[in-house]
Amino acid sequence: MQQETPGSAVISLLVDNESGALARIVGLFSGRGYNIQSLTVAPVDELGMQSRVNIVTTGTPADIRQIKAQVERLVPVSRVVNLTAEGPHVAREMALIKVVSSGEPRTEALRIAQAFRARAVDTTASSFVFELTGSTDKLDSFIELMRPLGLVEVSRTGVAAICRGPQTIQSL
Amino acid sequence: MRPSPLMGDQDKMTPQTASSAPDAQKPQTLSGAEVLMRALDEQGVEVIFGYPGGAVLPIYDALFRQNRIRHILVRHEQAAVHAAEAYARSTGKVGVVLVTSGPGATNAVTGLLDALMDSIPLVCLAGQVPSSLIGNDAFQEADTTGITRPVTKYNYLVRKPEDLAPAVHEAFAIARSGRPGPVLIDLPKNITVGNAPYAAASQTTARVAKRMPEPDRDAVKRAVAAMKKSCRPLFYIGGGVINAGPEACANLRKLVKLTGFPITSTLMGFGAYPGSDAQYLGMLGMHGMYEANLATHGCDVLIALGSRFDDRVTGRVDAFSPDSFKIHADIDPSQINKIIHVDQPIVGDAGRIITMMIEEWESQPAYGHQTELAAWWEQIEAWRALDCLRFSQDPAPDAIIKPQQAIRRIYELARETKRETYVSTEVGQHQMWAAQYFRFDEPNRWLTSGGLGTMGYGLPAAVGAQVAHPDALVLDIAGEASTLMNIQELGTIAQYRLPVKLFIINNHYMGMVRQWQELLHGSRYSESYSDALPDFVKLAESFHARGLRATRLDELDDTIRAALAHDGPVVVDLCVTEGENCFPMIPSGAAHNEMILGPEQEERGAKVTREGMMLV
């Protein structure tokens, strides 16, 4: 088998909203040595019977295929889609970023926040909490820029993802 | 606030309850335990293997007050699971286990994983402390669903009375569907004591067989086209064919006969194809037959049916069957390309795929490589002529018995009885020798712990097989170390008068550990000597069984005959040479063409590499 280069992949699952379902998925990843870079979960249907789980993981294409096949075996999992392999998709996350500074760094932080279209959702005389939504890359670079400007705390949601166009997780 | 996802008390399979069914005149008031009995009965359960305790007392009470389901009281919960596994393996039904909370459930864990690894359908019912006490570190409380999640195909904690019957029905459906496996239902005591509605299986919906489509006809077509083009083909079959049922095994025979191709089997596939047939090359893999392993290495088309390229089969992965076009038929898509990259995967039931292969074989243009196939057979026969299992037994009457001699004679003398015979084993050298010398013409007769390699499997497995087949001859080929891990089951055997024949191949060593220490660790026999062994004859007698012993060659046959003829449980202590090694052997990290052969076969194979040592 030819060496395939490792990369990251966004995998979206629809799972029955039952006790232990998340533990089952997370346990499968840890038990088989797969990586979870980020994970998001929330109910997505009207009755709250199903949740959507988005997992960002890394591995060779063969690893990712194996991960998908293993996750598909789980009883409460009704749908698994590798959005990265299935074509164009939107993957976004949200971060809350706290910056404590004064003087020039504080002004600079606000300037950069405006350039990134981050919103200041909490402001005190010495601090800002910025809310920023976007791709993982965008959040990463914003956080890097904030680091010398008084960054003290970060809270990120992990990736929510969906495929582009009229296709859905059910139709893919 | 939104309901907490995935953690809450979700009601996702509320059935139409029995009271709303048209045929129910009035709602019956049943306790949860009674609902459980009724659901088990509806699922066709005849036998439960179990052990009582506080949290399952209501279930044992319901069991007492009915007479359709029989209960076999084991002496340890691990044994209950192995017995149920053997019951399932030897009958094709779902095995059922009943254990109490806490230690009862944790003792079952090894058995559950054993069943998961070997794809055995089981339903394990576990007691749990009342719902109100869960999470309080109550007496005999364990997070059973948490502990058993990675060792089961699925598990439940029943939180509401109305979920009980649907959970039982779905558990059976999950256990037996697709790739079979164990399912655990955790039953809090308030659920079994309190009232619960009954729901018939037909009134509930089970989430199973999802994405279990008919095998892709085009994939089968391409596979058969490759088979038609092959000059050096080989079938490599596994336990999946046995799980596909007797009809699948019968069709496998037809397909193999139709093609004239050679066939090898994994440890789990014995009997799917008749072991006595000339096209059968025996087991492949680490202790597989010389001819089977060289054929695997040299074939140009490898047809894997219901087998999973286990590391004991493949040896060094990058040297496994290097020049072959690989066809892999498996019911579990996650097995495809997991270890070995295959050229033609087919996902589906082995039985359906075999049937489709027969149809395609008959409809596609005739096989045109008879000459090459004959040459391939000639090559295989040359390998076979090496007689890789030959060993030298000192013929003197007072000679020490070789373990190979003991196992071969058990096989031959058992076959002479012409009785329906089931064979279980423990794990180690004796297991591999049994795998080499025993040949099975029928499926479901060979009961061994393959994937997990659980020492102590064989004796409880013999219990399960004998309960399922009371009139059959049931043998446990054991080692003295393994069998001591579940020797308490002699109590179960005595209680139910199960005429199990336990043959202990007693070499005073954990033989396989000793062998690896000799080959890999400079003969430093660290902790592998079985010191302070019991007197197995007296041990047998104390458990109301017959005890026999053979220490010299001239006692061997008579002792085996006496054991086979005895109408009751027998423990036979066969004292054998201590330092015997099991050959052929593919050293870890080596390829199939680098086998080590026994001293009888002069060609000496590869040295074990340092990388190989890490592979275990």
Image (cartoon, rainbow, N blue to C red):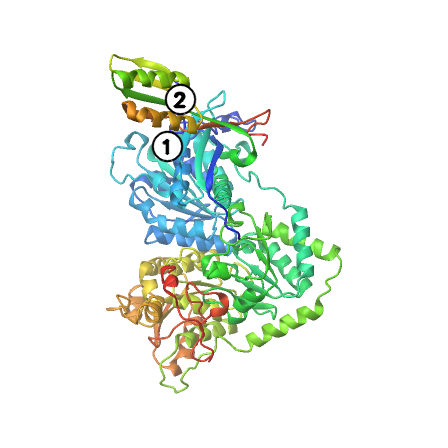
The spot of residue A10 in percent (x, y) is 48, 34
Quadrant in which residue A168 is drawn: top right
* Drawn side of residue B593 relative to residue B513, left or right: right
Give the Cα separation between the discs numbered 1 and 2: 24 Å
Query: Which circle marks residue B191 in the picture?
Result: 1
The spot of residue B279 in percent (x, y) is 61, 68
Sooner in the amino-acid sequence: mark 1 or mark 2: 2
**Residue B446 in sight:** no
The spot of residue A88 in percent (x, y) is 55, 30
Quadrant in which residue A35 is drawn: top left
Please name the amino acid that badge 1 sits on.
Ile
Query: Which circle marks residue B3 in the picture?
Result: 2
Local packing at callout 2 (Cα closer than 10 Å; few below 14, some 14-19, many 20+) is few
Q: Residue furthest front?
A: A104
Q: Residue A72 or B420: which is nearer the viewer?
A: A72
SS for tag 1?
Answer: helix
**Residue B509 in sight:** yes
